[in-house]
Amino acid sequence: MTVGSGTGLRITGVTSSYGRGNRVLDDLGLTVGEGELAAVLGPSGCGKTTLLRVIAGFVTPDAGEVVLGGRTISGPGVHVPPERRGVGIVAQEGALFPHLSVARNVAFGLVGAGRAERRARTAELLDLVGLGAYRDRMPHELSGGQQQRVALARALAPRPALVLLDEPFSALDSALRAGLRSDVRGALRAAGTTAVLVTHDQEEALSVADRVAVIRGGRVAQCGTPQELYAAPADPWVASFVGEAVLLPGSARAGTATTALGPVSLRGAGPVRDGEGTVVLRPEQLRLVAPDADAAVRGRVGEVRFHGHDALVLVEVGGAGTVTVRTPGPVEVRPGDEVGVRVTGAAAFHRDSA
């Protein structure tokens, strides 16, 4: 992520361990531009939560530096306490004070402000998150989604340099999650606040973030826009972790790979090197056609997973094993049907190490 000098969040060479030899973060580096929403994505145990705690100041790293808004908040000989970092936090379940009204929860962090300023800022933030009419409610009178909006308003009230969102939607049902994600993104943009969202949900990261950092084994395996990660994953592991992926052994020559699904055009920032490797396709690049159609390989349907707006069809193809085809709307095929599979578009290619 590219930022201007002195803005946003910059993490350099951060290493953190729990106990002897249990390294959780390993020389990790990450930069978030001012006003950006960055998602930190990775499997359980990869170091996401530890990274959040290092940024917040709850954990002092063994090595490395954290710079926020041009100010070093963690580094050799430097450890700014959490309450002086200018970092707001939205936890998984809001963590509102149950004995305080919505308005008093939001105003809690406005230490040193006059009564009129506190009242105006509270009203401004509640309007921003769409809860202006709820200022006198108590937390137990709110839905889970409303509580998370209040938690966001409370985090934004002191005008922090950074807001950390620790899997804030994980406790909500799927019907609420998508709408709240959009509202939170809109509120952060309206406030112009830099934010880091920690999540294990790939769809969440891809749908709300300006940038996504995928962590593996305590390091950033790849960082880029959601489109970059999806279309040009750094390696087959990232491809499989960020969305559904069809991985095929292939032999590249002159920009085309020979695979069990036939010849596949390859894309890359520059010329693709010839050799053996892995071809990365997305399920929507595969089409179901008649078994005898041109440029198609034969297969047999093993499973159909219907999702309403689309379906995933798992097809057994000789030489390729099971491949996943994404097809829109209702599907006519059933398990056991013979079908043809055709590849469309270009694929990413990762050459085997020598």
Image (tube, rainbow, N blue to C red):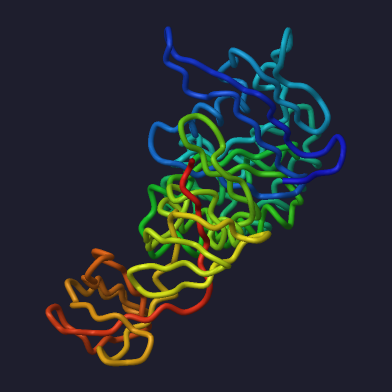
- Judged left or right of residue 85, residue 311 is left
- Identify the residue at image location x=37%, y=58%: 249
Picture coordinates of residue 289, whole percent (x, y): 32, 88
Picture coordinates of residue 239, whole percent (x, y): 46, 54
Give 267 or 352, whichever is nearer the viewer. Answer: 352
Place residue 51 in its image quadrant.
top right
Q: Is residue 40 above or below residue 129?
A: above
- Identify the residue at image location x=68%, y=57%: 128
Give 195 or 213, whichever is nearer the viewer. Answer: 213
**Is there any visible trace of residue 101 in the rendered image?**
no
Picture coordinates of residue 142, whole percent (x, y): 45, 52
Place residue 307 in its image quadrant.
bottom left
Place residue 64 in its image quadrant.
top right
Residue farthest right in this picture: 5
Give 281 or 83, whichever is nearer the viewer. Answer: 281
Give 331 or 262, whichever is nearer the viewer. Answer: 262
